[in-house]
Amino acid sequence: MRWLLRVFLLLLGLGFMLALLCMAALMFAFSLLRWLFTGRKPQLVLVMDSYKKWQQNSPWAPRPPAGDDIIDVPSRDIEPHPTRLPPIDKKD
């Protein structure tokens, strides 16, 4: 008799989960149709966009190095040292 109660509760839980899944799918389809006809983005898209902007502007976000720190220096030839390996001859 105990197994019958477990099966009943399992079926009840599966039905509840299926109902929630169907409701979520219908709400998603409705929001996409509303986005298509009115041009207003769904609330989830707006929240995710604002979260991405907040993440990029946060003080701990990695920043690219500044591009104006270029230092131009004169080049010079380095004479071969006797303890170094000989240079490789390039075949042109």
Image (tube, rainbow, N blue to C red):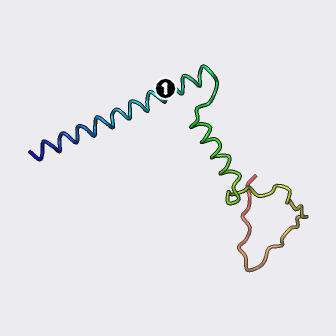
Q: What x and y, as percent, mark residue 86?
A: 73, 71
Where is 20 relative to 92, above or below? above
* Residue at left offset 76%, top offset 58%: 65
Q: Residue at coordinates 23% horizontally, 37% vertically from top-left?
A: 11
Is 25 displayed left or right of 86 in the figure?
left
Q: Residue at x 71, y 52 (%)?
A: 57
Q: Which residue is mark 1?
A: 29
**Residue placed most toward the observer, 85 or 51:** 51
Give x and y (percent) for residue 56. Answer: 68, 50
Q: What SS does tag 1 mark?
A: helix
* Number of callouts: 1
Q: Which amino acid lies under the numbered mark 1 shown in the image of this protein?
A: Ala
Name the spot of residue 18 as percent of width and height, x first: 33, 34
Determine whether 90 is above or below 76 in the image: above
Q: Residue furthest bottom?
A: 83
Q: Residues within 10 Å of mark 1 (few under 14, many from 20)?
A: few
Q: Quadrant of residue 84?
A: bottom right
Residue at screen point 38% across, 35% down: 20
Quarter where residue 67 is shown: bottom right
Most foreground residue, 41 or 74: 41
Q: Is residue 1 left or right of residue 36?
A: left
